[in-house]
Amino acid sequence: MMRREMRDAMKHLLPAVALVCVALLSDPAAADRNRWARDDPPAYAPHSTRDARISLEQAIRTVQRATGGRVLDARAVAGGYRIKVLTQRGEVRVVHVDAQTGEMR
């Protein structure tokens, strides 16, 4: 009799446990990371920033001040810079800085 009650209780509990597992294993920040990844320029071209008004170091300092985060990676890309930042909230963001205007997006 006890086994049947346990089996019945498990049948009702299993969907709830599965839902909790899916919720814990899902990565809510993945959609945000994918959104940022689509904004990447198609090709890296460090030589295209040769005549830039804004240097890579200036772009890094600007992004650090704007986000309050820690720079993980910085690269010259077509027409600007791609700077990856770890924000104070623990999120990784990619910021593009235009080499001519200093505009961040």
Image (cartoon, rainbow, N blue to C red):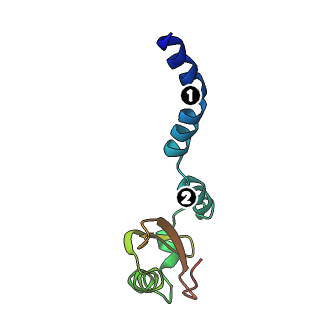
- Classify 10 Å Cα crowding around label 1: few (below 14), some (14-19), many (20 and above): few
Say whether residue 74 is left or right of residue 30. Answer: left
Instruction: Answer above or below: position of 73 versus 68.
Output: above
Q: Nearer the viewer, residue 54 or 25?
A: 25
Say whether residue 102 is left or right of residue 60. Answer: right
Q: Which residue is mark 1?
A: 14
Residue drawn at x 43%, y 86% is 65
| Residue 94 numbered tag | none
Q: Quadrant of residue 60?
A: bottom left
Quadrant where the C terminus sits is bottom right
Helix, strand or loop at disc 1?
helix
Tell me the CA gap for discs 2 and 1.
32 Å
Image position, residue 5 (x, y; %): 53, 17
Helix, strand or loop at disc 2?
helix
Which amino acid does the dot numbered 1 rest on?
Answer: Leu
Image position, residue 67 (x, y; %): 46, 80
Q: Nearer the viewer, residue 86 or 95?
A: 86
Q: Nearer the viewer, residue 18 or 85?
A: 18
Residue drawn at x 50%, y 90% is 53
Residues at discs 2 and 1 in contact (Cβ within 8 Å) = no
- Name which of mark 2 and mark 1 comes first in the sequence: 1
- Tally of numbered tags: 2
Residue drawn at x 56%, y 30% is 13
Report the mark closest to the observer, 2 or 1: 1
| Residue 33 numbered tag | 2
Image position, residue 3 (x, y; %): 48, 12
Which amino acid does the dot numbered 2 rest on?
Answer: Arg
Instruction: Answer above or below: position of 26 versus 11.
Output: below
Residue drawn at x 50%, y 85% is 52
- Classify 10 Å Cα crowding around label 2: few (below 14), some (14-19), many (20 and above): some
